[in-house]
Image: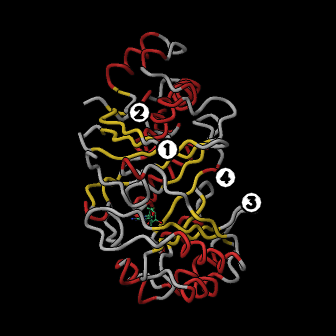
Amino acid sequence: MPQALLGMELSEIRQVLGAREPEFRARQVYEALYHTQVHDLIQITTLPGKLRQQLVSEHTIGLPELDRRYQSNDGTRRYLLRLEDGRTVETVWMPEDTRDTLCISSQVGCPVDCKFCMTALMGLERSLTAGEIVGQVLFVARDNGLLEPGSRLNIVMMGMGEPLLNLPNVVKATRILVDSRGVGLSEKRITLSTVGIIPKIEELGREPVRPKLAVSLNASTEEMRQELMPITRKYHLKDLLDACRAFPLRTWEKLTFEYVLLRGVNDTDADARRVVKLLAHLNCKVNLIALNPGPGIPYETPDPERVHAFQAIVKRSMPCFIRKPRGLDIFAACGQLKRNEG
Ligand code: SAH
């Protein structure tokens, strides 16, 4: 089976071309893949004919294929992309006036069993390769003309999966995405979100090139958090906040905490005050997400007034935003990615 090139860094491409080829050949292939984004290896016309033939016969680019595309009436598009092994994964594009956001997946399904999330109902099928992570960006960007000069593209690793349980591939993909000879995106515009796998947060902090860190807090007490996110029985809230405090933020960076609001469960004024207390002394902002409901999810969405009241309390102490749900009508919003046909 031909080997996919997408996801390879320069040193790996050098190995593929063989020791006899000069280094600049590997660079030409790397730039063609990630910067020029050729559709076909035969288009890398800077390579000598023989080398190009060799590449074409032994390799593919390895972009995912379109399985289905769903169009929301708010402009959001949800993509079901088919991978080499036939599995499918979801990527969501959310256009806005001043910027675009691409929400990409790090795994097929998810091993974390959050009680309010539909992806959890799938379980984990497998982790994605670095090429499959980069491939989502290249595919959807091309489909929508997003990588034109001057475009303001944000990438959030908040689709299917727990990125910190696939850290090496997530970090490798990030290096390719931000490399100026690669895809050339800004490091400031890539964020990953985690349930809070503490040892992996520490590992992430040691990476020289990495996404920004967002943590799904989702509860104001240890007990509630363990009930909603059973994996946190292993990673306690206090230790998580210690790890966040120790996280080496870059000068331009703030931590983000996400908080899914569930009616009558974690959405009271007292919860809001506890959130403020927990996050005091952290350089952070809070994103509130009113629950996006779905079949099999035993929780309800709070009224907008409740969400605003919660925000008002947190906002007195730190920046706090309400995340607008996008693509609800096509099951593209947070917690709704489940490869359903709807
Ligand atoms: N596993 C990572 C990445 C997924 S990000 C994480 O949990 O952070 C998805 C974000 O959407 C998380 O903050 C999660 O708490 C939130 N979310 C999950 N299900 C949701 C739902 N049904 N409604 C609103 N937000 C949800």
Residue sitting at x 70%, y 75%? 318
Q: Cα distance, mark 1 to mark 3?
A: 31 Å
Give whichever of 208, 276 is nearer the camera. Answer: 276
Q: Tell me the element at label 3.
A: loop
Q: Is the residue 196 above or below the residue 179 in the image?
A: below
Q: Determine which residue is flagged by label 4.
A: 188
Instruction: Tell me which label, 4 or 2, sits earlier in the chain.
Output: 2
Q: Cα distance, mark 3 to mark 2?
A: 33 Å
Residue sitting at x 41%, y 33%? 5
Looking at the image, which residue sits at the far top? Answer: 49
Q: Tally the numbered discs.
A: 4
Instruction: Tell me which label, 3 or 4, sits earlier in the chain.
Output: 4
* Res 252 label: 3
Q: Determine which residue is flagged by label 1.
A: 74
Indicate yes or no: mark 4 CB to ligand 1 under 8 Å. no
Between marks 4 and 2 in the image, the one whose residue lies nearer the viewer: 4
Q: Tell me the element at label 2.
A: loop
258 left or right, relative to 254: left
Question: Residue 331, how many percent across, how many down?
Answer: 36, 51
Q: In which quarter of the image is ligand 1?
A: bottom left
Quarter assignment of residue 182: top right
Amino acid type at image mark 4: Lys
Instruction: Tell me which label, 1 or 4, sits earlier in the chain.
Output: 1
Residue sitting at x 57%, y 33%? 146
Q: How is the image coloured?
A: secondary structure
* Res 9 label: none
Question: Residue 123, how many percent across, how many down?
Answer: 26, 62
Q: Cα distance, mark 3 to mark 4?
A: 8 Å
Amino acid type at image mark 3: Trp
Instruction: Tell me which label, 2 or 1, sits earlier in the chain.
Output: 2
Q: Determine which residue is flagged by label 2.
A: 5
Mark 1 burial class by Cα count in 10 Å: few <14, some 14-19, many 20+: some
